[in-house]
Amino acid sequence: MKIVVVGGTGLIGSKLVNKLRERGHEAVAASPNTGINSITGEGLADALKGASAVVDVTNSPSWEDAAVLKFFETSTRNLLAHEAAAGVGHHVALSVVGTDRLLESGFFRAKLAQENLIKGSSIPYTIVRATQFFEFVKPIADFSTVGNQVRLPPALFQPMAAEDVASALVGFATNSPVNGTVEIGGPERFRLDEAARRDLAARQDPREVISDPQARYYGVGLSERTLVPNDDARLGEMHFEDWLNQSTKQAPKSASQPA
Ligand SMILES: NC(=O)c1ccc[n+]([C@@H]2O[C@H](COP(=O)([O-])OP(=O)(O)OC[C@H]3O[C@@H](n4cnc5c(N)ncnc54)[C@H](OP(=O)(O)O)[C@@H]3O)[C@@H](O)[C@H]2O)c1
């Protein structure tokens, strides 16, 4: 199958492109870096010729309220219009578990606008809502840092490896459209503050993580279950501890390096 991965040079996109190619599919990594731009439309018509599916794993360069809304609306409209013109029969988009519970944030209002444009279009679709990536735990901690302290609420949290997100997307992109929303998450559920504490400890980062029920998540007040997926979510395989061990282990020194 020819599958166009828009955002194909990003964290999820690059893994998805590799996995599709390993399985013998023709995967096109579409992004401004490869001359294909979902905002300006540059390169889209050529890229989409003969494609069976388009997977949208783009992200906005700016998360400022107006900019992120403009990005996801413009990008999604352009993709859907080009897909209709090229006869593409499946639009897959990566969104976030709990998007409709996080609307105090401009980023999530933009993701909901993206989802609604897809649902309102004529293109058969699958919206895949994922929980936070393991790779995103440190950025969450960084965003919530003041001085040497990280304040996070003890909300339930079920993050997953980017690798597992990409594997799930392979399955959705190469199967029939669901014409609905599916959820994916990690294999374990713990607390947001605990995840940040474990992540920073594994990196020997001296910041102190404080459990604070009043602390906000990107400006949003969380309840116990805001970030957790539905009971029927498909779960990834990789455990946080294994991922931390892998991603924080020191690269072995080469022979030419001083000991
Ligand atoms: N972070 C999380 O925990 C989480 C959880 C669930 C879902 N998600 C969603 O997952 C998606 C992908 O996230 P990610 O972390 O993989 O993103 P990322 O690493 O930031 O990659 C973003 C990609 O979008 C591309 N892009 C930017 N502007 C574009 C344009 N005008 N036209 C085409 N491509 C463009 C970038 O291309 P260049 O490299 O050329 O700039 C890059 O390939 C996002 O929509 C996000 O909302 C994230």
Image: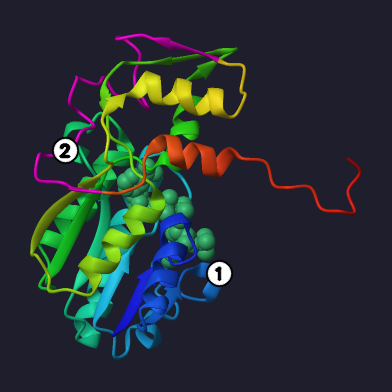
> Does the residue tagged 1 have its C-beta within 8 Å of any atom of ligand 1?
yes
Mark carried by residue 33: 1
**Residue 142 located left or right of residue 110:** right
Type of amino acid at the residue the image marks with label 2 = Asp
Q: Is residue 85 above or below residue 177?
A: below
State which tag comes first along the sequence, 1 or 2: 1
Residue 223 x/y as whole percent: 19, 19
Q: Main secondary structure of the magenta part?
A: loop
Residue at (44, 77) in percent of width and height:
42
Visible in this render: residue 121?
A: yes
Q: Label 2 neighbourhood size at 10 Å, few (<14), some (14-19), many (20+)?
A: few
Residue type, numbered disc 1:
Asn
Q: Which mark is residue 100?
A: 2
For the residues labelled 1 and 2, the Cα–Cα distance comes to 31 Å
Q: Which residues are magenta?
A: 208-235
Q: Secondary structure at mark 2?
A: helix
Q: Where's residue 75, x and y in %? A: 33, 63
